[in-house]
Image (cartoon, grey):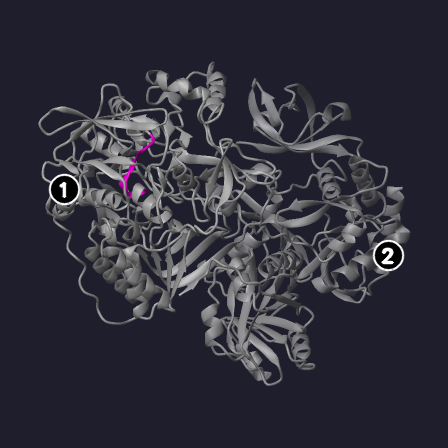
Amino acid sequence: MKRLPPVPGELIDRAQSFEFVFEGRRFLAHPGDTISSALLASGVRVLGRSFKYHRPRGVLSAAGHDVNALMQVQGPSYSVPNVRADIVAVEKGWRVTAVNTRGGLEHDRLRVLDRFAPFFPVGFYYKAFHGKRLFPFWERMFRHITGLGRIDLRAPRRATAKRYDFCDVLVVGAGPSGLTAALAAAERGAQVLLVDENAAAGGSGLYARGGEGAGAEEVHALLRSVRAEPRIRVLLNTYAAGYYADHWVALAAPECLIKVRARSVVIAQGAYELPAVFRGNDLPGVMLASAAQRLIYRYAVAPASRIAVLTANPEGYAAALDALAHGIEVAAVLDLRSDRGELSRHSAALLERAGVALHQGVTPIEAIGHSRGVAALLYRSAGGAQQRLPIDGLWMSVGFAPANALLHQAGTSMRYESAAEQFVPGELPAGVYACGKINGHYGLADRLADGNHAGAQAAFAAGRSGTAPAPAPQLGSECRTHAYPIFPHRGHKEFIDFDEDLQVCDIENACQEGFDSSELLKRFSTVGMGPSQGKHSNVNALRILARVRGEPVERVGTTTARPMYHPVPMAHLAGRGFTPERRTPVDAQHAALGAVFMPAGNWRRPEYYAIAGKSRAEAIAEEVRAVRTRAGLIDVGTLGKIEAHGPHAAEFLERLYTARFANLKTGMTRYGLMLDEAGVVVDDGVIARLAEGRFYFTTTTGNSATLFREFGRLAAWWNLPVGLVNLTGHMAAFNLAGPASRAILRGLTDLDLEHSAFPYLGVREAVVATVPCRIMRVGFVGELGYEIHAPASQGAHLWSALLEAGHRHGIRPFGVEAQRMLRLEKGHIIVGQDSDGVTNALELDMPWAIKMDKPFFVGQRSLRIIAKSARRQTLVGFKLPSESGARLRECNLIIADGRIAGRITSIGRSPTLGCHIGLALVEPAVAAGGELRIRTEQREEVTAGIVSLPFYDPHAERQKIEDTALLELAS
Amino acid sequence: MSVTNGATPRTVRLEDFSSRRRFGLKGPAAEAWLNERGFDVPPGANSARIGRDGVLVARLATSEFLIEDIGAAGESVQGAWRALESAHSPAGVYPVLRQDFVAGISGSGLPALLRQICNVDFDPVFEAHAAADGPVVLTSMAGVGVVAWPVRAADRCCITLWMDPSFAHYFQGTLSSIAQDIAR
């Protein structure tokens, strides 16, 4: 292994060099070198250890799939795990270590596991974890001996941007067929985005040369044309990680994730070269021929000094010529086929002329080596004689698997093409095209013609026009892929899957254990479930499965290639998140008053207002007492606020809510309960009639956006021409509550607030503190109260005016927690807290709110059915002394006869009543029993007495009596 | 060909137009009512037009409109709103209180910014609509539902966004953060 003299087109900058450290030793690299190429250029063949058996491993693909060459890279301040040595450019000063070793790469203590391979049968994990008793033991052991890199928690958080991009035609893959497709589309006027995962475009056209063939010149000419074409943009070092509906494609670029929307897509991703499967095929120095060619032509590295080529196609002969052209001795070309075929004859003649031994009908037996790599190949000649060939490199070129994951994700139906021994697209979805090796075309001329055809078709699909392309080429007569390059050995270690250390016997045994479908085999054996996602292993595993089942490969099917089919950095996926937070118009005032905020839906709301020297509970209790004895002001601007206009508005609300609204008088409000079709309670609110055809109503905080969309859908469904307006963020809203609330409001408005003029549940439009408002007399917290709604821009002024006017009455702002306690004392439910996703309206025991005699409301039909059955649960109130109540939490279970019979939905210490009170959903039989047995988180049992609701002011006296009486009562 | 992996520093200008006078209306008779009062109503849904008095009429749907005074049009917008809000508003016309947070975004970094926050391709819109008239797009930006009005004037692209005012703090903060990244 050595650095070659300059190679035309190499990606390294020889004018500069720098040092980096690998496993404690210093090495030189040039800018552009990958970690692997720099190490190979310095004679290092062993790059990592395998996942399970800790076997030494080296380069396999040099194409981003070398899972056994994952590195932990230590930078100046933190380290990065799982860096792919075969494609990541090394940088000056990096300190690199192989992942998954104990004691370093060379002296890995866990390499002893290789000797215990027979004790790790297929499905070992499942079998080991089957019993509960030893689960922790196995878990700890597996965590210790297997794994990838270590996450460094010192790594900084980056708000990695995601971005969208758009084009007429997206071409994935900038090899010969992709370049031609891009040009064909651009020539027809399409704006083209061409992406390639490599640092340079050209694909195999630039590294699979067959010596110094003319093909590379043709590809260079294509590249020049692409550079000159202004309609083509090129993204390099970028791979398409997933295809989604409507031609959305996720691109993983070096710095971020790009979501591309294309009018049409051309998939030209080529094919993955497949390894031959024989004993010792994983030894360092044994690699895919394409890997060796990449190392030679991209990084000017000779990966061996004396090689053999194990082949079954013309590409293997071409690789041997590439080796010769760069001074690498080719000991032999060993062809698995008995007839090398027409396409290999010219290359074979050149090789023979150079003195290379060529053998047909060869069977590999074993690659022999040591901890530093391959030293010889043992094979059987066509005549049956066993031969030993001393080498330090073995290049495999026995076939390909098309890179068709994106086509699968796009919904392409595939068919197995026996002439090519690979799956090819059967029927492509509209706007999706494929070309090149994916279609089974491996000759350069065919790939170019196929790309031209696909590019033109894609341009047409994108709405562009131009000359019709030449027809797509027919499939060539010579197959590039060996039908079964698998050679089991009684000593095993013939690896199918390099990620998971799976051998031929593992796949066979899994089939024999009954996991004999492709999806079951994958999950049981874990084939294809490692970081390379089966790119080099799935096809060979399916071949074994087909042989065990005695069926052709096409009958066993393939596994699903889900997005992301190639690993994407977590930072890309996390990216910059968009989590909108809504704030009311008085958010700044809350902060100035010492609010402690909490999220409520996507709103930020004051949980309570902190008081220096007092606890949270004390502050909340003071807020409750202020509302009960003087006055409190809470920001309820987060409620959904909706208007319904038009002559059919009342009819619309009749259908939407369980209550009746056709008879609701103008100037009055009514409570509304909203159900879904199953009769489950989904929301509640107050509906106010402002005029004959004009209603204004509220929804709960978390549901407003969803419900507004649903209202629009229902109005269209019912064909009711009702004008719906969402005012949620456009209106501020405050609840002024407490015995002094009328007196406070009276100082700010000319509206007659007397009970006779503005009764309980009335609504009025009036000016308050110079602001035009809607005022509703409601009593959610159980006191005389006014819910005041005003335009958002004047909300801050109104809030300040109310607090100022209330100052002499001892007003306090109160938060969500105090409101929860106040409404609990009053026995009012909170939908979503005191109900859940299956709680129907009958179970909440609110018959007054449900008008079953109406012609229709959503959920009515279900309620009629439910009413005929025994009730499943019911809502009850309970009370208990504070010392035991303090141990209870919401969702604590109600136990009856040793089983779960319900749960607490609300619980808290009432400052007004001086004890703990709560609501619980329980079985009716338990509700009738008079007491609840509640299990705490500490598994203790607490008994609470069931009481009638509400806990406070059962006759709603506080809504009716006059100010003075109220204040007297409060005092 | 242009290789787009590189990054060029760009600027983004964010202006708050929330204080402009505006209102909305909807209903089957809304278009006729606007025409009667002399507003220049665009004929198709999802389009906008600026009248001679500097009043923008954005048609958000077949019978839903947003009216905004973007050229100091005096009392016409305010007067229309008062008439609409009065107890005798005409049948089939429903007033819509619009207290929107209105953001005007411009600058050389605008296209890059839009590509980070929205999945609509605005480039063709900017190219096709050099005048102030043009489409309005109802979409989502940075997770917030917006009405977007993209225009190009004197080769300067800008976009005006209307959104629920409760998102103002979040939206401004998010955009500022992205704009800083883009400017680097």
The quadrant holding residue A952 is top right
**Badge 1 amino acid:** Glu
Please state the horizontal and vertical placement of residue A627, each as a whole percent of the image.
81, 45
In the visual, does A729 lie left or right of A861?
right
Identify the residue position indicated by label 2 in the image: A804
Around disc 1, counting alpha carbons within 10 Å, would you say few (fewer than 14), some (14 to 19), or many (20 or more)? some
Towards the viewer: A742 or B78: B78
Marks counted in the figure total: 2
What stretch of residues is rendered in magenta?
A284-291
* Picture disc at residue A426: none
Give the vertical position of A311 relative to B23 (above or below).
above
Q: Residue at x 23, y 30 (%)?
A: A545
The quadrant holding residue A331 is top left
The quadrant holding residue A935 is top right
- Indicate the chain on which mark 2 is placed: A
In the visual, does A121 lie left or right of A568?
left
Please state the horizontal and vertical placement of residue A482, each as a whole percent of the image.
18, 38
Q: Are marks 2 and 1 on the same chain?
A: yes
Q: Residue at x 54, y 34 (%)?
A: A151
Give the vertical position of A238 relative to A75 (above or below).
below
Q: Residue at x 44, y 55 (%)?
A: A259
Identify the residue position indicated by label 1 in the image: A352
Secondary structure of the residue carrying numbered label 1: helix
Q: Quadrant of the N terminus of chain A?
A: top left
Give the spatial CA distance, label 2 vs label 1: 102 Å
Q: Given the current orientation, which residue lies at the most extreme top position?
A: A133
In the visual, does A114 lie left or right of B119?
left
Give the vertical position of A772 relative to A571 (above or below).
below
**Badge 2 amino acid:** Glu
Asked if residue A634 lies in the magenta stretch, the reply is no
